[in-house]
Image (tube, rainbow, N blue to C red):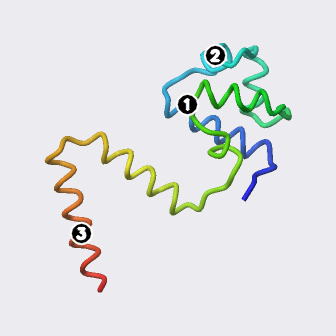
Amino acid sequence: MLIFDMRAIGNKLLDFRKRAGLTQAEVAEASGLSDRTYADIERGTVNMRTETVLRICKALHITPNEILTEESPIDYKQEEIFARLSLCKPEERSTALELLSIYLNSLK
């Protein structure tokens, strides 16, 4: 489902920027925007042209779909868990997956 609320889009951009460990100034520079313009975009106080959306997404290494569509909270949580698992050592990942498997089997 498409999001038309600029404040919601701005909040998503803020979240992706923080996850990437970037400052507003760094994203603004990589997107060819002024610091002020990018800050206004994150606050949701300005509308963006398609070109601007694409440049910001490129700077954050995300797709427009990730900021312009709404995910269910379950999908978002699942992605977060997968991302965290990918950062684990192999033995930690194995333990976590085994625990999940035991839990899922208990639901039968």
- Quadrant of the frame with the N terminus: bottom right
Please name the amino acid that badge 1 sits on. Answer: His
Q: Residue at x 68, y 19 (%)?
A: 31
Position in image of residue 55 (x %, y %): 70, 25
Can you tell which mark lies on residue 61? Answer: 1
Residue 26 position in % (x across, y down):
60, 16
The crowding category of the residue bearing disc 2, from other C-alpha atoms within 10 Å (few below 14, some 14 to 19, many at least 20), is: some
Q: CA distance from mark 1 to mark 2?
A: 11 Å
Image point (45%, 52%), residue name: 79
Percent x, y of residue 38:
73, 23
Asked whether the beta carbons under mark 1 and mark 3 sit within 8 Å of each other, the answer is no
What kind of element bears circle 1? loop
- Residue neighbourhood size for the residue with mark 3, other residues' Cα within 10 Å, grouped as few (<14), some (14–19), many (≥20): few
Label 2 residue SS: helix
Q: Secondary structure at mark 3?
A: helix
Whether residues under marks 3 and 2 lie with C-beta atoms below 8 angstroms apart, the answer is no
Marked residue nearer the N-terminal end (3 or 2): 2
x and y percent of residue 3 in the render? 76, 52
Disc 1 from disc 3: Cα separation: 32 Å
In this view, the residue in front, 43 or 78, is: 78
Q: Residue drawn 75% across and 34% down?
A: 43
Residue, disc 2? 30
Name the amino acid type tagged 2: Ala
Q: Left or right of 45: which side holds 64?
A: left
Three-letter code, disc 3: Ser
